[in-house]
Amino acid sequence: MVLALIYDFDGTLSPGNMQEYDFIPAIGKGNREFWDNCNRMAEENDADPILTYMNEMIRQATVSGVSLRRDAFAESGRKVKLYEGVESWFARINRYGQSKGIQVVHYINSSGLKEMIEGTPIARYFRQIFASTFLYSVDGVAYWPGVAVNYTNKTQFIFKISKGIDSVYDSKAVNRFVPEQTRPVPFTHMIYIGDGTTDIPCMRLVKEKQGHSIAVYNPADKEVGHSLRQLVEEHRVNFVAPADYSPGSRMDEVVKAIIDKVAADDRLKKLEL
């Protein structure tokens, strides 16, 4: 039996945005200046903010002489800070799942850059990283967005995970009817973990399909934690927790309780046969 844990990245596994740890300082900009430029471009052109930030990365890197090669993005990813407990989280949860007869698999579903996530020390734990990515020239230099993952098209990857589809390109298989009970990962065997508005469609989708969703917040910002509780009242998420993945944390307790529930539900279903 498989249980999928699906994570956003920025603000969920890492504080802030991944570009802020290395790339933005390298081009000589401040965080606010960079993101204000991206948002202004999106507003003035009525454009997708994900595409505009990717365009601004290419433009600013070209002007500043910063490398746009895939390995340079991966190197930036190695400098990304992770929340407390994240690096040991995946192996611990995998072991707990195994003790309950469940294979836990992990996925990323992010508007951030796949190339940077691949450079982080946790990249090896993910079965698939669904995230924004660039197209590369024959010389290995990024020149155009290849995939732009925004808050609405994030939901397509939930269906792909459910149906066992790893390809971003394949739009036929994801639309093919597959009965819920025969899917590699039924929605009831999903946990979606996200931090904000870009994750609400995914969190609500998983919850409405009888899976579980968890809204997380920076433990240092308790005000945001209080505001996120409105999502529970609005029936858009199941739980709210600080983004602390340490043993014994609320996140640890909630995810283990969900694993226990999925295992118990499976045993009950078998008794009905």
Image (cartoon, helix red, strand yellow):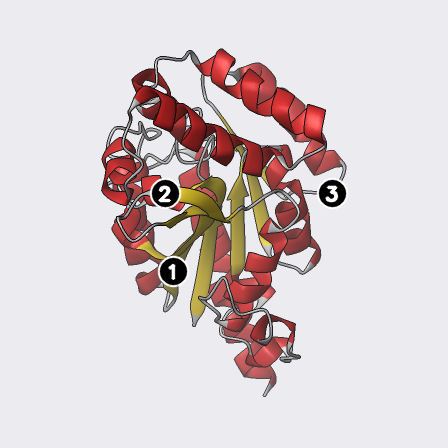
Q: Amino acid at mark 3?
A: His
User: Is residue 217 at least partly visible in the picture?
Assistant: yes
**Mark 3 neighbour class, 10 Å CA radius: few under 14, some 14 to 19, many 20 or more:** few
Which of the two labelled residues, at mark 1 and mark 3, occupies the earlier sequence position?
1
- Circle 1 packing at 10 Å, graded few (<14), some (14-19), many (20+), is many
Q: Quadrant of the C terminus?
A: bottom right
Residue 8 appears in the picture as rendered: no
> Rounded to the nearest whole Å, what is the CA distance between mark 2 and mark 3?
41 Å
Disc sitting over residue 235 in the figure? 3
Q: Is residue 4 above or below residue 204?
A: below
Residue 225 as seen in the image, left or right of residue 89: right
Location of residue 76 with respect to 109 vertically, above or below: above
State the image coordinates of residue 214 (x, y, percent, origin top left): 56, 42
Dot 2, how many residues are within 10 Å of its Cα: few (below 14), some (14-19), or many (20+)? many
Identified by mark 1, the residue type is Val
Task: Assign a secondary structure to mark 1.
Answer: strand
Q: CA distance from mark 1 to mark 3?
A: 26 Å
Tell me, for residue 142, which label it has, or none: 2
Residue that protrudes farthest toward the bottom in the picture: 273
Q: Earlier in the sequence, mark 2 or mark 3?
A: 2
Q: Secondary structure at mark 2?
A: strand
Residue ID at (62%, 24%): 41
The residue where tag 1 is placed is 105
Amino acid at dot 2:
Ala
Label 1 to label 2: alpha-carbon separation:
30 Å
